[in-house]
Image (cartoon, helix red, strand yellow):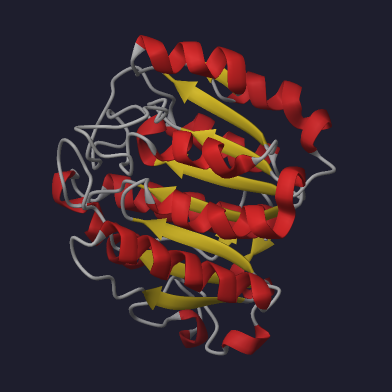
Amino acid sequence: MIEGKSLVNPGKFLGAIGEYEKANVVIVGLPMDYTVSFKAGSRFGPASIRQASYGLECYSVYLDRRLEDKKYYDLGDLVLPYGNVEKSLDLISKTTENILKSEKKGIFLGGEHLVTYGILKEYLKKYGDNLVILHFDAHTDLREEFFGEPYSHATVMKRVWDIANGAKMYSFGIRSGEKEEFEFAKKNIHMFLYDVVEPLKKLINDIKDYPIYISLDIDVIDPAFAPGTGTPEPGGITTKEALEVIHILKDLNVVGMDLVEVSPSHDIAGITSILAAKIIRESILSFF
């Protein structure tokens, strides 16, 4: 339910202000799903999340905070050359670079998970090995290649690792991948299987003084709660746990985040899109 016409801006996320210069945070949609290996459709995710946001309240009872007290601008969706992975990633990187140069934080709505690589190329340039990357996902995404392609939603975190140069990478909720990926993870990153809440709680003191980037694949959540995704994986976390993750990070130095792989054409009654919108709302109120 929405009170006040000033918060209604069709085509934009709930509560977004109309002036880029006054915003502390920029929301941008990345409608790309060219490398999805199972069920395509996540390029329609950003628009679906925005539309669903108007079914939410502007007030969070969890945090006792309101969207009216935040200044964030919705840039809309990037126009990407359909099927051209390299050029699309370049455009995503350039947009991210512009956001960071204007001293703003980014919220990126996917789209497939490969978009995270284009985003983090710029975040790693700015923050270097001080950056902490928190990756929430059902899948390892650490393959060297997938169907012969080095750039894929199944290889994204390996491509990020390739350019991370010592930045700390943590993966949570993982429950699917090839054996080689898990072996690589044991040697090179911090990976927590199945769970998210307890491992994150134990980690907080180690990361609280660093800039943090969050990459949240909606399939970390069990498909019973979030069926609208391209590669659903049973055995995931609940919606309650997903929101708890965001609240655990409250008031930390989160400098950016993405929420990816929402595929509305595979959703039931829009429940995945409304969940994604609520996660974004809680994120804005928690740490942006």
Q: With 118 as the anchor, is 113 left or right in this view? A: left
Q: Nearer the viewer, residue 50 or 259?
A: 259
Q: Quadrant of the C terminus?
A: bottom right
Identify which residue is drawn at 24% across, 51% down: 270
Q: With 271 as the anchor, is 26 left or right in this view? A: right
Identify which residue is drawn at 19% across, 45% down: 267
Q: With 275 as the anchor, is 163 left or right in this view? A: right
Say if 267 sits above or below 119 in the image: above
Q: How many marks?
A: 0
Residue 235 percent coordinates (x, y):
35, 17
Say if 153 sits above or below 121 in the image: above
Residue 265 percent coordinates (x, y):
14, 51
Q: Nearer the viewer, residue 61 or 125?
A: 125
Q: Nearer the viewer, residue 217 or 128?
A: 128
Identify which residue is drawn at 28% across, 57% down: 85
Q: Quadrant of the N terminus?
A: bottom left
- Would residue 60 be visible to someone looking at this image? no
Say if 239 sits above or below 51 in the image: above
Q: Nearer the viewer, residue 160 or 198?
A: 160
Residue 110 percent coordinates (x, y):
36, 55
Identify which residue is drawn at 54% across, 28% down: 171
Residue 38 percent coordinates (x, y):
15, 35
**Rendered image quadrant of residue 154:** top left
- Would residue 285 be visible to someone looking at this image? yes
**Rendered image quadrant of residue 284:** bottom right
